[in-house]
Image (cartoon, rainbow, N blue to C red):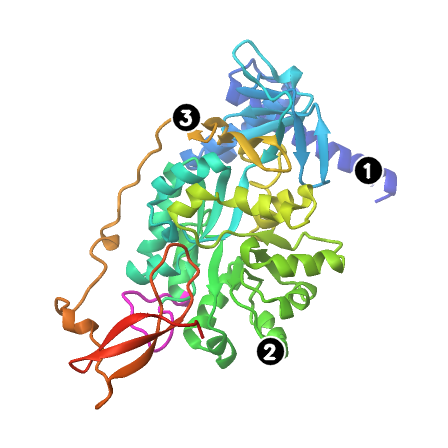
Amino acid sequence: MTTRASRQWSRRRFLSGAMATSAFATISTGAGMPREAEARDLDELQRGTQDLPAAVQDRIGARLRLMRVALAQEPADLVITDGTMLDTITGELLPGWGVAIAGERIAAVGDVARHIGPKTTRISARGLTLVPGFVDAHYHCESSRLSARRHAEVTLPQGLTAYFEGTHEITNAARGLPGVEYFVQAGRRLPQKIYPCVSSATPPSPVETTSGHIGYREVALAFERWPEEARGIDEVMDLPRVLDGSARLHGVIQATLDDRRVVAGHGSPPLDVLDGWIAAGVMSSHSARIAEAITMLRKGVHLQLKTERSGDMIRQFLELPLRDWRNVGLAVDDRTAADLLDRGGMDYEIRSAIALGIPPITAYQMGTINNAAHWQVAHLHGVLAPGRYADIVIVSDFDKVVVDRVFANGRLVAANGQLTGPLDASPIHPALRNTVRLSRELRGSDFEIPAPPNRSEVRAYVLPLRQGHEHRLFLLGARVRRRRHRLDGPSRPP
């Protein structure tokens, strides 16, 4: 075939595809009969789609409507105009760029005046900045001590529209996969997207007992049941089992790799074993140490920084200078409800990153597109662009990350720090109730520690209960009462 003939053939093939799409769009809108030249394509499409499940046909219909709105053939449901839009791909602030929304998705960005119709809701963002909804790369909702719905009531007004939930805590209490299923079902009812990552640590170690077991088969089953929500596994944290070739743990990793999903890690392996840890399949860490961090980056590990613990690391990156931050994201990890209300969540992390010297646009990228790209959902989150979820945060102060309004799934869900309406509660799975199972009732004597013979004083290491996730081990003096320890108070921490 000559080059000219090849181009003609390619053009005919392209036009044929365009006609087929046009014919299918005609079906969807109930418009007039297509031209005779398109009739054959119409018949072929009817034959090809009539056996599709109804849900698939609905998704095709929604996508075609989104396309028609993008082409200004139909008006948008909602447009946001007059503001400045952050493009997290190019790193630009684009004055005058707006967003046109159809249903739950973005149809168009830029000059959206042509997408306005008589019934289009128009919102002015004059003097404000439009940024993508925040995406947390590693999170434990359980640490807030709130249900998924109550947690969304706190964090949606802060701009958090999607997070990747580490489920190893709930799955160890809920007999395995029911813990993952809880977050799947909760996320389907909420405008906040929840991506529960299947636990790699159920049980947490070979010597611990647990109510569940997750291995290769369970992980594969989770990906089959919840392919859109379960995007990978959460924090492979048992370095000795990784290096020893644990059958269960490597089965979990292999099931994830077999399904081309993400293997999230934890910790900061010593440099002499780092290559082995990465070669085993681990792709990220949210708790790297400064000694290994830059080497981990150089070897392809995605780092998810918690700013309150990463100040020195961020300063090191800035001094290098680190020229490409795409493989660095932000994560909250663990935060109580009180701390979320007091400090914030991902908005706090972005704000703190800016305060530590990271350029503001880079900090926003770390809390949006960088995390979305790592988790293979950049086609859904992290950038304001056609086809993505219409999850939009409008900020009144860009550098201080002051959230004015939050849109999720194309509708206003929060304004001035408050929800605009109630959220749907998901039922609690029976496996999540009565999860503390003891062979007998506890007695006061269970908490007594026998003292060595003939001792009037002893010293003991104690981990006190306190708000927040950070704990410190204290060395306390204890007087002996009837050969039992009695704590007097803390001395200097060790």
Q: Nearer the viewer, mark 2 or mark 1?
A: 2
What residue would you read off at disc 2? 273
Q: Secondary structure at mark 1?
A: helix
The tag on residue 412 is none
The vertical placement of 489 against 333, above or below, is: below
The vertical placement of 467 against 338, above or below, is: below
Mark 2–mark 1 CB contact (< 8 Å): no
- Whether residue 287 is visible, yes or no, is yes
The vertical placement of 469 against 474, above or below, is: above
- For the point 45% across and 41% down, which residue is it? 193
Quadrant location of residue 317?
bottom right
* C-alpha span from label 2 to label 1: 53 Å
- Whether residue 46 is visible, yes or no, is no
Looking at the rendering, in which quadrant would you find the N terminus? top right
Q: Secondary structure at mark 2?
A: helix
What residue would you read off at disc 1? 7
Q: Main secondary structure of the magenta part?
A: loop
> Residue 69: horizontal and vertical position, in percent?
59, 22
Side of 65 where 148 appears, left or right:
left
- For the point 41% across and 50% down, which residue is it? 226
Foreground: 238 or 145? 145
Quadrant location of residue 460?
bottom left
Q: Secondary structure at mark 3?
A: loop
